[in-house]
Image (cartoon, rainbow, N blue to C red):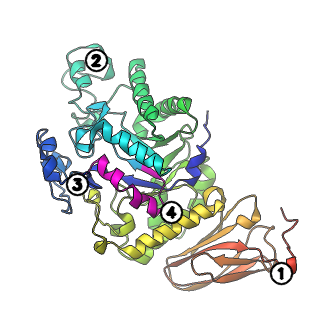
Amino acid sequence: MDYPTPSWVYEAVIYQIFPDRFAIGRGKLVYDKEKLYTKRGGTISEWGTTPIRTGDSRQSKTFYGGDLWGIAEKIDYIHELGANCLYLTPIFTSPSNHKYDAIDYFSVDPQLGGNRALISLIKALKSHSMRLILDGVFNHMSNLSPLFKKAQRGSEFREFFNFYETHHRAWWGVQSLPEVNLEEVSVRKFISLVLTHYLKLGIDGWRLDCGQDLGQVNNAFVASVVKNFSIEKYVISELWTYPSGWNMVDGTMNYQFRELVISCLKGETTRAGSLLEKMYRDTPKIFGCWNMLDSHDTERLATTFPDRDLRKLAIVLQFTYPGVPVIFYGTEVGLDGGSDPECRATMIWDESKWDSELRNFYKQLIRIRKDEIALKVGEFVLINEHPIAFMRRTQNIQDTIIVVVNPGNEVNLVVPVPDHRILDRSKFVDLFTDEVFKVTSGTIKIPIQAKSFRIMKLKNETPGMYNQYKLVV
């Protein structure tokens, strides 16, 4: 069964946070919390220093001190940006900074403030009408987990894992990450308890780590548990695949979107428009999918595109293509960084080091998306391949938006307006510049500079109270 996408998801702009690297709360520095890390074999690093790629476990044992208290103290910053939903990478007790190796699913790591900090964060978010998505890592856990240790000794938890003569089944063969035996009824009951425990606390959804390892059956199982709690709770699965065919969840982390956008803006393909249109047509749950440009698992957008003009074009596509825009913390102020762990650098809180023009650009785009229903629920119609031009439209013709993204040289674009309801002499207004462009016999001429864009909305003028759209449906 395909569940309906939660109604609030169409309005969502998600802000992703890697908790150890966003903010330290309660006026503390990492040195004040040192024992929380060193007693588990970790080391601390000063805020602002670049994470070092060591190629071994040391990079996952370096801590900067960020916690949930710090996130709660920065909600005003996120709210003012315009994001209305947080996605946190894992927060449960774990030996690592990334916490994709849970020891105890029912305890928020004391390094991040513990259970009290989570409850406080949920309360603070609700006071701002904001939502929270947690990261569920149910394919594997830490070999330091009491569950795993008891299983090794032959307890009733042995069926949670697959043991062999000399080893156990583990994620990508990494023995510190034993895979959970998801086929067992007892394991599913345990996962159900975890899911519902945090839903009862007030979270709004789950992101499922390693969606491909969970497979369709367990993606559907998790969705059934969550939707049984409330049909308005959200389930997104981490799948680095073509997004169609995973309709048992509300959507996937649409990294395919990221690849197409990057390839287009780097001039590696001139077919990105038609490929984006095909993906839209093939994916019934596209409006619940995440429009990703960077994350804790990729290099930063500013590293992919040091040219800010090209970066802006990527962001325009992120906010105008069907799906949920996801902003990786710091990307909005120009934070850069290569692949893991460099992409997991600490947030910049010195405003003099921000790219404030870029942050204001994000704020403007978020306002436009929130104001324009076509950008939230409208159909995607490609009208030109290169440069990409497309229409977002709804049942109400006056909602229509046309978007043009031009990574190449300046061009005077002449394109059809493929909707018989859009009448001659109608005008489209650029929502950034207020420039006006007129429709003539079903075509529109759009001059567009190099490495620039247009987001234009249909404007119905009514001279002398005459309305040519009065009977158009």
In the picture of the structure, the residue carrying the numbered disc 3 is 27
Q: Assign a secondary structure to mark 2.
A: helix
Mark 4 or 3: the one toward you: 3
Identify which residue, 77 or 226, lies in the foreground.
77
Of the residues tagged 3 and 1, which is closer to the observer?
3
Determine the secondary structure under disc 4. Answer: helix
Q: Is residue 299 above or below residue 355?
A: above
Which numbered mark, 3 or 2, is in the foreground of this view? 3
Verify CB contact (< 8 Å) between mark 3 and mark 1.
no
Above or below: residue 337 compared with residue 151: below
Task: Left or right? Give the position of 417 relative to 218.
Answer: right
Using the numbered discs, state the Cα–Cα distance from disc 3 to disc 2 in whole angstroms: 44 Å
Q: CA distance from mark 3 to mark 1?
A: 60 Å
Q: Which residue is mark 2?
A: 158
**What is the C-alpha distance between the residues marked 4 and 3?**
35 Å
Q: CA distance from mark 1 to mark 2?
A: 77 Å
What's under tag 3, amino acid-wise?
Answer: Gly
